[in-house]
Image: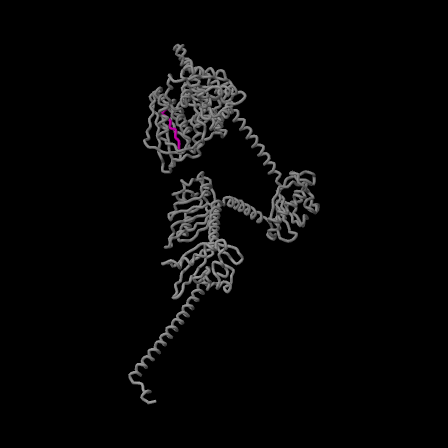
Amino acid sequence: MDDKFLTIPDDLMGIIAVALLLLAVSFLYLYIRQKKHTIKASLQAQYDNERVSSFSAYSPDALIRVDANEQVSLWTGQAEQMFQFRSDEAIGKVLHELIIPANTRELYSQELPALLTKTNPPPFKRLQLEVQRRDGSTFPIEATVLLLKLHDHHEFNIIIRDLGEQQAAQDKVIEQKQWLSAQQLALNEHAIVSITDAKGNITYVNDKFESISQYSKEELIGANHRLLKSHYHSAEFFITLWDTISNGQVWHGDIQNKAKDGSLYWVKSTIAPLVNTAGEAEQYIAIRTDISHIKKLETKLQYANQQLANNLQKTEQEKSYFELLFDKSGYGTAMVIDDHFLNFNAKLAEMMGYQSADEIPDHILDFSPTYQPDGELSLEKAHKIIELAIKHGSQRVEWLQNKTDGSTFWCDVLVTRLNNAPHPLLHIVWRDISVEKKLTEDNQRITNEAIKANQAKSEFLSSMSHELRTPMNSILGFAQLLAADEDEPLSDNQRESLDYILSSGQHLLKLINNVLELATIESGKLILSLEPVHINGISQDVINLLKPLANEANINIQLKADSDVLILADYTKLKQVIINLVSNAVKYNKNGGQVSIDWQASEDKQLHFTVSDTGIGISERNKKYVFAAFNRLNNANSQIEGSGIGLVVTKNLVEMMGGRIGFDSTENIGSSFWLTFPITNSVDSVDSVDSVDSVDSVDSVDSVDSVDSSSTKKKVLYIEDNVVNQLYVEGVFELHEEYQLDVVESAELGWDYAMQHDIDLILMDINLPGMSGKELTKKLRQTDIYKNKPILAFSASAMKHDIESSKGLFDVYLTKPIQMDELMAAIRQYI
């Protein structure tokens, strides 16, 4: 072959060379790109593994990775613990077939594929569902599904949180809150808690604080703790306290406080400041415990220790404390093991009646009777006491002992365990309490007798009230009927005589009321209802009430004060006090004289109230008898009416309401009686007592317009066994044609009549033969007809306890005797 056919042109060789070079470059590029992808995939896998390892190390949640077909490719250690499948058992399995219960498997099998079909699937999806463990048990989870788009496929990272553990944690939080609430409740139940602001003003108190201080929350909130100051502690004490807490430190100590009623009590206090971010105290919380009983015991203990120290000084210096206590004690003392004496002092032998210590038997029960007074065998009871002493350290019991002469006596026996040996050593002390027992029994007997006497006195007062008021009702009632009789009018002489009867009857009634009230006060039966009272208003009421009396005597009553003050008192009793003082000032004045009422408020929050007159005054010799019962000084034979006990009752009432009373007087110039009461700023009622409305004076009943006579007559049933009272009430109603009165004489007849007729109002006597008025009223109140109809008590039983016992039963409680106008005014209130 010719060489020219083997020759390649140079330009073709260049093209071939370039082609080969491009081919080599292409292969090199593909190799580098593949290598780069391999390295990137390796690094990504390493990064993913590190993230998974970090997630597994710090998260309590399980991480599972699956492909688009839900085949597991990653199963962390948390997943192994949660589902009880090892990683090699789970990888390659279809996830929903592995962990979804069969009954819901089909429902959840489409959850992941559905994400792939969406154009813009969300970056994650959160599911809550029930899954199962390897053992078939189920539990709730929250699954967060993250969709990962890789270069050639999709994967899902699923983070699973066990909601059962989360619920358990929440339950734990709830349990902790309940525990804290219980702690708070226990604190409020057993501790005295208060919170103050930075200035020491109270912003919160619990119920225990109210109870022990006797102040209400309304009185305490906004007040300072100085409200409770007892003046026991020095100023330096409180300066130290305040310096401690204002510097952010906790203060501990004991404080004596004073309650609202003036009683003293001790508290162990812990006061802690609550500071802000700047370290400044904004509030102080104080937790206190009542230690009054401990302080009393400490006082007794200090006294006992002082006594013991005094006794020790009298003994010989070489004797030890134990020898002195054991041998020289005033009590019988012994050391005992297993019911047998180890040793004992001479006092024990003396107490039991032995001449010497050698004569005492060996067993501790040899000088006890077979049975104790409660019927229990001495041996059995003693062993119970010893067992309790061994268990608790000591035990005390009252024990009946025998003496050698056969007599018995009571001892206070204290058994104390001295060690914890299998057969412990016991220290037993006998103290003779026969005298104390006798005194206790005597005191109990005297107390019982006093209670019986007091009850008898109350019964006597109630009986006397009824027995005195019943005839007074007839005297005053029929006298009024005679005065009101227009058909047979009285002559001038008869009317004058009748006026004397009425005046004397009213005076006698006032005397009866004063005597009974004084007896009630002395027996401790009087109940007051303290409330804030405006002194200006009550003074005006008294002046309006007594002006007719003053005008008749040509006496001018003047109210000097123009301010008003609020004091705490029983309104009715305070009015009674002022009426008595003003009426005395009128009665014992001179013709054309003056009576002045005035008051001032002092800086120490005390009201000084005075009633002054220009009357006859009181001599120096008689001043000491002013507040003595049944002493009218030199006026016993004068024309001025009086019982001699009005000022005694007044003084008692004032002092019971927390006030004081006194007077200044100059004979033939005049007298000035004064009262002092603490001023109050509160308008809340204190110690108020609900009671049945009672009518015993005309100003206690509101006036009511007369019933139209053209209307149908109102039917009134009067149940009364006393014929005289029947006649009186019938006479009263004859003057009032708008009413129809029917009268029956017993509760049984009253029941029958009320059931057979339509009655508008019942006037009820209390002390009826057979069934009482109260019993009948209770029976009537149980019926639909008379549940709400007016039933008025009308009785001569006018004691406070009589009225209080009818509380809530009658609409009003009328006491005999009663003025006709008062009776009809009370009835018109209801019909």
> Which residue is at the front of the view, 830 or 649?
830
Residue placed most toward the observer, 316 or 299: 299
Identify the image quadrant of the C terminus: top left
Residues rendered magenta in the picture: 667-676
Vertically, is 271 above or below 260? below
Side of 351 where 200 appears, left or right: left
- Say whether residue 678 is left or right of residue 183: left
- 94 in magenta: no
Residue 666 location in percent, x, y?
38, 27
Q: Answer with left or right where residue 627 lies relative to residue 417.
A: left
- Confirm whether residue 3 shows in the render: yes
Splitting the image into 4 quarters, where does residue 260 fall? top left
- What residue is shown at x 30% (from left), y 83% (from top)? 12
User: In the figure, 127 relative to 204: above or below?
Assistant: below
The image quadrant of residue 730 is top left
**Image location (x, y in percent) of residue 251:** 44, 51
Quarter the N terminus occupies = bottom left
Farthest-out residue, bottom? 2
The answer to whether residue 176 is above or below residue 147 is: above
What residue is shown at x 55% (from left), y 28% (from top)? Answer: 453
The spot of residue 713 in percent (x, y) is 41, 17
Whether 672 is among the magenta residues is: yes
Q: Residue furthest front?
A: 1
Colour logic: one colour
Q: Position of residue 202 (x, y in %)?
A: 40, 45
Query: Most prominent secondary structure in the magenta stretch?
Result: strand
